[in-house]
């Protein structure tokens, strides 16, 4: 195998230069980076990260030790850790103890010999006898073990709550004789689970028998449960595998009655059996990875003293799937009018399930944005539709005219409101303090960058050499334009992409959405402090100048809608893109996406994004209010909101941020609520004549006029001001 010495000789550089390039250190020129990388490739050199770690006294190894690698919960745990650390150059190894303390001890010794960064352990022992260096992080999963250093971390779900909630459902279902199967009641999670279940079952007068099941004997124990002399009404287990064992044992004696089965399971994609209590071990793995990264970066420990303090800080909660049972009242039909977008497409795919569950058919009419606006404006008090989705920018003008007032005391409305993101402002719900709608596909502008470009050492070095500053995610529009120019091949022949950005300014109202955040960054206000709608100002002129400069670094043809811009980004043609979050899924759902898993997201430059998306309300003219509420309850339920999001849409249910599968696909969702709080739009401030949608149309027309050369920027804003004076300022 080639050595660093061989590479240095081949490339004609020093040993130190080669070492710096391979370890991403030092101040090395672009030319030398290229020489070293080409030499390493030609000589077939592969960096041995483990050997490098041993030389430095610190490896980037993570060892995960679990009782069984065939158990789904531990597979999900590993997947969560691996996904979060995928691009961090960690070596992750999963080892199986088979639930045997002696084997676990041998595996722990093996893991420690590799001087790992962290050991993640779902232990089958009661006490650790091995000496663990203080700089090796130990994360105990579900089972607290004595004998580890004081800085070890214990992370678990709330198993006592799980046991209690499963037992409560078991009682509601009419069961009186219950077997509870677990590996060993001395394990922390098992002990907590048994306590929660026993407290409920005993208080209800039910019979409970706890059956400890050593790992090698699980299948045997399944037969014991089925062939008990006094049959059990129900069996509660602590793993999906125990349920499968009982079902398998039952196939050998189908005459025996299969007890009702309840279990803790690792949360999975799609709908789970209503008796299966879901815990998201993949999300737990993500949390563990974040703890490891924090520890590896040298961040101070803020978890508190002792395992109980740590447990309270990072504890997770499970849940039963929220399957709704609807009382059919005969066949009914609802008519829903909505904009044609990813959310409407996803909802339409799921509607057959709602019809099967409730007997209610929902006919969906999807209209382009422009056409929907025209249809809504004509409705007033009369509508052919029962439910209508309106853009939040129209709410002030149209909401009170076409929708009936929502009863804030209604149980369904209260449940929906409690499930929606906290950060969504009242502008999505209300007009002048009266509630008419619910936020549906609410969204906020976000900045998306190509991670593979922004973290490429050669590109970073080249940017530094040409700009004398580091290549970082832009925080201002000045930085945004500098980076966009660097990545535009017309200005930089070596750029790996054709353009720095993609802009959506083919329509007036989309162009305004790109312009206004620049205006707000400059300190502009709309209306101004006197209540006047002033667009021919220095702040707006500076914002328009910035925007026209961005157009120089954007794809040649102006895009008419954000989906088109997302497609450009997905196909790898641009380095950055500003999108409303509801269209961001198109970057990874695109069949030809070259950026899936390679996206950095951040606030828009300047930190003043526009809010977007829409709300849904019940029309004044419908006589099916109760049926509409039933549909809305289904639409906003956890499982439907999650499925819509999986399919590329978005229902603003706060529980989706607790789903690791969703966050793996769309990591930016976890920060949407924070960015909502910084967003602006849909407010009537000090000017009753001010119509934000109309203003956006005026401003966007000015952008198109200036960008096409029909008028100068000054002339475009002067004309826009005249229109604003007529419409808003008299």
Image (spheres, rainbow, N blue to C red):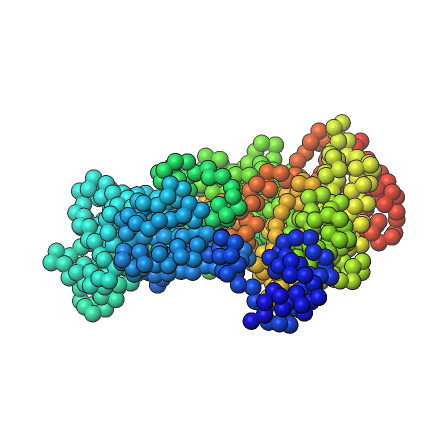
Q: In front: 569, or 478?
A: 478
Figure quadrant of residue 153: top left
Q: Is residue 674 visible?
A: yes
Taking 716 as reference, is 198 left or right? Answer: left
Taking 430 as reference, is 548 left or right? Answer: right
**Residue at the left extreme of this rendering:** 229
State the quadrant of the N terminus. Answer: bottom right
Percent position (x, y) of residue 315?
39, 43
Give the residue drawn at x 25%, y 54%: 183
Figure quadrant of residue 522: top right
Percent position (x, y) of residue 186?
24, 47
Percent position (x, y) of residue 442?
58, 46
Percent position (x, y) of residue 64?
40, 56
Taking 51 as reference, is 501 left or right? Answer: right
Give the residue drawn at x 73%, y 54%: 463
Q: Is residue 226 visible?
A: no
Give the residue drawn at x 69%, y 67%: 11
Give the residue drawn at x 79%, y 39%: 540
Q: In front: 611, or 307?
A: 307
């Amino acid at each position: 195998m080639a050595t660093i010495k061989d590479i240095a000789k081949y490339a004609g550089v020093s040993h130190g230069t080669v070492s710096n390039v391979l370890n991403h250190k030092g101040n090395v020129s672009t030319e030398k980076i290229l020489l070293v990388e080409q030499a390493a490739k030609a000589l077939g050199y592969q960096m041995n990260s483990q050997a490098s770690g041993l030389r430095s006294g610190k490896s980037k190894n993570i060892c995960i030790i679990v009782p069984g690698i065939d158990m789904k919960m531990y597979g999900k745990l590993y997947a969560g850790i691996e996904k979060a650390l995928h691009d961090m150059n960690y070596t992750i190894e999963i080892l199986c103890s088979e639930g045997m303390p002696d084997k676990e001890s041998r595996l722990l010794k093996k893991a420690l010999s590799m001087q790992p960064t962290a050991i993640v352990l779902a232990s089958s022992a009661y006490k650790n006898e091995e000496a663990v260096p203080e700089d090796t992080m130990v994360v105990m999963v579900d089972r607290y073990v004595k004998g580890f250093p004081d800085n070890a971390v214990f992370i678990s779900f709330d198993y006592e709550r799980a046991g209690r909630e499963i037992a409560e459902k078991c009682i509601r279902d009419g069961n009186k004789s219950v077997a509870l199967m677990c590996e060993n009641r001395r394990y922390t999670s098992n002990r907590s689970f048994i306590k929660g279940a026993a407290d409920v079952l005993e208080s209800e007068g039910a019979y409970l028998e706890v059956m400890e099941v050593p790992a090698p004997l699980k299948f045997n124990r399944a037969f014991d449960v089925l062939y008990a002399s006094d049959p059990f009404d129900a069996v509660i287990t602590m793993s999906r595998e125990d349920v499968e064992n009982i079902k398998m044992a039952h196939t050998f004696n189908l005459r025996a009655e299969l007890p009702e089965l309840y279990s803790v399971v690792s949360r999975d994609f799609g709908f789970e059996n209503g008796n299966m209590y879901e815990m998201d071990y993949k999300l737990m793995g993500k949390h563990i990875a974040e703890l490891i990264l924090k520890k590896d970066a040298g961040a101070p420990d803020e978890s508190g003293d002792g395992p109980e303090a740590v447990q309270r800080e990072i504890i997770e909660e499970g849940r039963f799937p929220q399957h709704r049972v609807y009382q059919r009242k005969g066949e009914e039909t609802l008519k829903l009018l909505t904009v044609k977008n990813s959310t409407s497409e996803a909802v339409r795919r799921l509607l057959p399930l709602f019809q099967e569950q409730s007997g209610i058919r929902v006919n969906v009419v999807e209209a382009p944005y422009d056409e929907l606006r025209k249809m809504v404006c004509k409705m007033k008090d009369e509508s052919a539709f029962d439910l209508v989705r309106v853009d939040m920018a129209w709410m002030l003008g149209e909401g009170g005219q076409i929708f009936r007032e929502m009863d804030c005391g209604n149980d369904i409305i209260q449940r929906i409101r409690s499930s929606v993101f906290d950060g969504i402002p009242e502008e999505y719900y209300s007009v002048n303090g009266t509630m008419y709608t619910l936020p549906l596909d609410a969204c906020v502008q976000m900045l998306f960058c190509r991670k593979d470009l922004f973290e490429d050492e050669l590109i970073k070095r080249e940017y530094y050499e040409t700009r004398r500053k580091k290549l970082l995610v832009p925080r201002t529009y000045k930085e945004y334009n500098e980076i966009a120019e660097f990545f535009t091949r017309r200005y930089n022949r070596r750029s790996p992409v054709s353009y720095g950005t993609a802009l959506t300014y083919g329509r007036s109202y989309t162009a305004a959405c790109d312009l206004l955040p620049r205006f707000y960054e400059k300190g502009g206000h709309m209306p101004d402090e006197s209540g006047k709608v002033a667009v021919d100002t220095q702040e707006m002129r500076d914002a328009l100048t910035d925007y026209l400069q961005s157009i120089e670094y954007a794809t040649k043809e102006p895009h008419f809608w954000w989906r088109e811009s997302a497609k450009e980004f997905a196909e790898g043609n641009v380095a950055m893109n500003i999108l409303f979050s509801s269209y961001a899924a198109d970057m990874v759902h695109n069949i030809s996406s070259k950026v899936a898993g390679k996206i950095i997201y951040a606030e828009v430059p300047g930190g003043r994004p526009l809010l977007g998306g829409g709300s849904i309300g019940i029309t004044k003219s419908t006589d099916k209010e109760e049926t509409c509420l039933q549909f809305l309850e289904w639409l906003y339920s956890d499982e439907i909101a999650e499925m819509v999001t999986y399919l590329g849409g978005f229902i603003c249910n706060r529980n989706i941020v607790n789903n690791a599968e969703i966050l793996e696909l769309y990591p930016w969702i976890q920060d949407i609520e924070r960015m909502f709080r910084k967003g602006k739009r849909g407010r009537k401030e000090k000017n009753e004549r001010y119509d934000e949608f109309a203003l956006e149309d005026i401003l966007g027309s000015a952008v198109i006029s200036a960008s096409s050369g029909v008028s100068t920027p000054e002339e475009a804003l002067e004309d826009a001001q005249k229109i604003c004076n007529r419409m808003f300022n008299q």
